[in-house]
Amino acid sequence: MDLVDRLLSGDRRAAAQLVTLMEDGGPPARAAIATLYPHTGRAHIVGVTGSPGTGKSTLVYELAKEFRSRGKTVGIIAVDPTSPFSGGALLGDRIRMQKLSTDEGIFIRSMASRGQLGGLARATGDAIKVLDAFGRDLVMVETVGAGQSEVEIARAAHTVIVVDAPGLGDDIQAIKAGLFEIADIFVVNKADRDGADRTYLTLEMMLDMGEGNRGRDWRPPLLKTIALQGDGAVALADAVECHLAHLEGSGQLHERKMSLAQEELRRILGQELLDRLMEQVWTKEWDSLTQGIADRRIDPYTAADTLLEGFLGGVALEGAAEGGDHDPR
Amino acid sequence: MPEKKIRVLVAKPGLDGHDRGVKVVARMLRDAGMEVIYTGLRQTPEMVVTAALQEDVDVIGLSILSGAHMTLLPRILELAREKGLGDVVFLAGGIIPDEDVPALREMGVIGIFGPGASSEEIAGFIKEHVKKD
């Protein structure tokens, strides 16, 4: 039986092998996506992000446990960074999720970021599709420990939980752009630690100023948790369900799905164009052009135009250079 | 561009809290360009095999210093075969007396690395035995 058929019949090994296929990429991965795509779109995709050490993995574990007790099946994709030097990775998110590992209703997969910036791996979106088609009610995605601009998760999830912990920065950190803007739900984890109240108040003030609303009729709820003891998991699961109900009730779920689709298509097109272009030019002009840029004989934008002209043909490029002017002249 | 990576699960089955060695090995393999999944201490055979299945690993490395290797390793191998993971490369490390080595090899633990095994030795062994097309 074909891998996708096995996946759809509930075979966990097939799910694991398909995720690997997505990571390896190429035509077999595309063919599998084409077959399983009609079976996706049912899962609620929940992203969990925040700085390293805020307790994301432990919180994901507690949340997954809570959703299991509510009768939901859960898929977890946990992303950790790839070494820029060796290309290897040490994936340790499962350590916090041990007790769930043999529950049939849970599927945990660790992913290395493989050089992708933004907090996710290149194949994370496709891995989500695999677990969605596998029939998981919830797919939770834990990002790489995020700094301030690892906001890719907002382009992959329906609900984004941003996890903060005491002692990580003052109120200016909280009003900077980036990570805090993408939250649908805020969590102050390690709420038993010194400074937790201050962190909580800082975030609350930020929310009072309208940060995080982005013109939505949703004010991100702010919750306290102590993930290690499981405190706050019930309220957090409630907030996640409440957010989904809000998205569904307000018609925003459809909007979000549309914007996810646009982002995804744009990203794939960009990657695809780049790959095809590189296939063509690699052996021809690449070396001389890069040498020229290094020697200051040609600037990088002109060099890029030269390559694009050869690839797209002069006419298409001229149209683009006119700023999208469709006048046929 | 996407590429295939060797994925390795390193685990500490049984009641054994000594994880310095396994962490050193995990780091070595990371530096050799592999994706290493470490699952933590006190794993049951079921936990090890479930993790290996979900992570779709090529290699399972088990570190045991408790002396329970002749009980735990056969159980893990048996479960792995039941779940269709027969083609995974099994390695063991830790404190394993010489007299147990032949029996373990017979069972299918093809690589056994005690204290003093070098990074090149372990990573080289894995690269030789895992076929990535």
Image (tube, coloured by chain):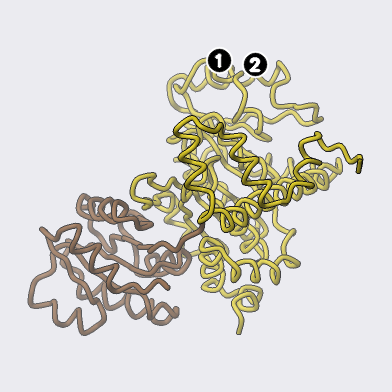
Chain colours: A yellow, B brown
Along the viewing direction, whichever of A130 and B120 lies nearer the viewer: B120
Along the viewing direction, whichever of B31 and B73 lies nearer the viewer: B31
Checking the image for residue A171, the label placed there is 1
**Residue at x 31%, y 60% (from the top left corner):** B10
**Residue at x 59%, y 50% (from the top left corner):** A140
- For the residues labelled 2 and 1, say whether their Cβ atoms are less than 8 Å apart: yes
- Residue A229 at what x, y percent from top left? 46, 40
* Mark 1 closeness class: few <14, some 14–19, many ≥20 residues within 10 Å: some
Q: Which residue is mark 2?
A: A205
Instruction: Name the quarter where the N terminus of chain A is drawn.
Output: bottom right
Amino acid on which disc 2 is placed? Met
**Residue at x 77%, y 44% (from the top left corner):** A259
Instruction: Name the quarter where the C terminus of chain A is drawn.
Output: top right
- Residue A186 at what x, y percent from top left? 62, 31
- In screen coordinates, is B116 left or right of B14? left
Query: Which chain is mark 2 on?
Result: A
Whole-angstrom CA distance, mark 2 to mark 1, is: 9 Å
Direction left: furthest residue = B98
Dividing the picture into quadrants, the one containing residue B132 is: bottom left
Q: Secondary structure at mark 2?
A: helix
Dividing the picture into quadrants, the one containing residue A132 is: bottom right
Q: Are marks 2 and 1 on the same chain?
A: yes
Amino acid on which disc 1 is placed? Asp
Q: Secondary structure at mark 1?
A: helix
**Residue at x 44%, y 80% (from the top left corner):** B84
- In screen coordinates, is A206 left or right of B133? right
Along the viewing direction, whichever of A264 and A286 lies nearer the viewer: A286
Query: Which chain is mark 1 on?
Result: A
- In screen coordinates, is B92 left or right of A232? left
